[in-house]
């Protein structure tokens, strides 16, 4: 039995679909408010709980052999990115779980001080690696599925908002490839006790994205390039009203200001280890946008 957290998220949903396609038994950790009908329909065992409660985590881990941790922060990196994962690992150890797959983030090891999610992920990576449980840590670049709503807006308006340096490099990864890598991590021998940077097959500049949209929709892009100062200004204003949101925005700012791309050797290792050919961003978008 697999336990998947964040089962209604972009990655988790795809992980559950793939596991069910392979006729594996899956327990999907969802909140009562989550949109989990599709997962139930696919035959996943629905566990309703909240990852902020240790009791729920302990109950969800009963009888599972594999855990894929794919939940998000919901603006509370300490409770969800950090504590919930530490508790999942503790329970995994207590239950004798055979393999733990952790979705981290590219750059988790770069020591960004102002980015709570990155700090939490790195602390969890260390805890997992020292736990004695078989593990695979995946550090993805940006997900291709994040761009689907932006592509839909582009289709309607031709607009693309780009915040920060258009020349920053990125290795956006197909969310379907990432889900497959997460699932295969428990069986592929070369993935045991390893950390992988996970990106798409090409290093893109951020300014390439509106050009890809333009090719897909055959429409000239109107690119509005906002400086990072706009985010800094927003953070300062929010800081007066809500200091916690100001801190959470540190992660967002880091994502906008830094480069997140995988080196060619990292991509080659990924393709070789998992025996797959990674999909380009354009191919992913064309599949989902049916163009
Ligand atoms: N998106 C990216 O570009 C990216 C890049 C690198 C790494 N990652 C990492 O990948 C992981 C998944 O990202 P994603 O984009 O797939 O996430 P997502 O689409 O934002 O989904 C987040 C998931 O976490 C669940 N969740 C949030 N708070 C919860 C709580 N208190 N109890 C139980 N479940 C809770 C959500 O449930 P509901 O449906 O109820 O809201 C949802 O299923 C995250 O750890 C993220 O840091 C993401």
Image (cartoon, grey):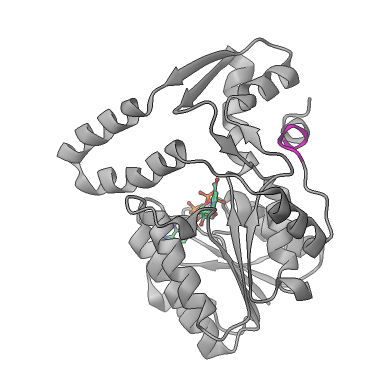
Q: Which of 45 and 130 is in front in this view?
A: 130
Region rendered in magenta: 280-284
Looking at the picture, how far across and down is residue 8, in whole percent?
Answer: 57, 54
Corner quadrant of residue 19: bottom right
Q: Count up the numbered dots.
A: 0
Tell me, yes or no, whether the highlighted magenta stretch contains residue 283. Answer: yes
Regarding residue 59, the answer to whether it shows in the image is no
Looking at the picture, how far across and down is residue 223, in whole percent?
Answer: 53, 15
Is 126 on the left-hand or right-hand side of 234?
right
Regarding residue 138, the answer to whether it shows in the image is yes
Corner quadrant of residue 23: bottom right
**Residue at 74% over, 44% down:** 201
Tell me, yes or no, whether the highlighted magenta stretch contains residue 259. Answer: no
Is 172 on the left-hand or right-hand side of 189?
left
**Residue at 52% over, 41% down:** 259
Looking at the picture, how far across and down is residue 104, in whole percent?
Answer: 53, 60
Magenta segment's dominant SS is helix
Q: Nearer the viewer, residue 234 or 39?
A: 234
Q: Among all residues in the image, which is located at the extreme left? A: 240
Q: Nearer the viewer, residue 18 or 235?
A: 235
**Residue at 64% over, 40% down:** 144
Looking at the picture, how far across and down is residue 89, in whole percent?
Answer: 50, 78
**Residue at 53% over, 86% down:** 93
The quadrant in which the N terminus is found is: bottom right
């Amino acid at each position: 039995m697999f336990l998947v957290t964040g089962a209604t998220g972009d990655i988790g949903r795809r992980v559950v679909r793939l596991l069910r396609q392979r006729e594996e038994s899956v327990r999907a950790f969802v909140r009562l408010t989550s949109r989990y009908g599709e997962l139930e329909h696919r035959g996943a065992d629905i566990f309703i709980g909240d990852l902020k409660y240790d009791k729920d985590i302990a109950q969800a881990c009963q009888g599972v052999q594999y855990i894929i941790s794919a939940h998000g922060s919901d603006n509370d990196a300490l409770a969800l990115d950090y504590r919930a994962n530490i508790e999942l690992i503790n329970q995994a150890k207590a239950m004798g779980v055979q393999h733990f797959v952790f979705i981290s983030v590219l750059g988790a090891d770069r020591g960004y001080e102002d980015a709570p999610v990155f700090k939490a992920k790195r602390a969890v990576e260390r805890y997992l690696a020292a736990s004695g449980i078989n593990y695979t840590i995946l550090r993805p670049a940006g997900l291709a599925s994040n761009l689907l709503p932006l592509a839909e807006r582009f289709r309607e308006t031709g607009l693309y908002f780009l915040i920060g340096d258009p020349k920053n490099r990125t290795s956006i990864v197909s969310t379907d490839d990432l889900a497959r890598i997460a699932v295969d991590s428990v069986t592929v021998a070369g993935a045991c006790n390893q950390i992988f940077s996970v990106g798409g097959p090409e290093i893109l500049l951020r300014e390439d994205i509106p050009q890809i949209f333009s090719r897909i929709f055959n429409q000239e892009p109107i690119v509005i390039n906002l400086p990072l100062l706009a985010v800094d200004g927003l953070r300062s204003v929010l800081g007066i009203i809500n200091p916690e949101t100001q801190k959470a925005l540190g992660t967002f700012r880091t994502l906008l200001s830094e480069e997140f791309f995988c080196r060619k050797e990292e991509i080659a290792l990924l393709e070789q280890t998992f025996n797959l050919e990674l999909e380009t961003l354009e191919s992913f978008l064309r599949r989902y946008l049916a163009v």
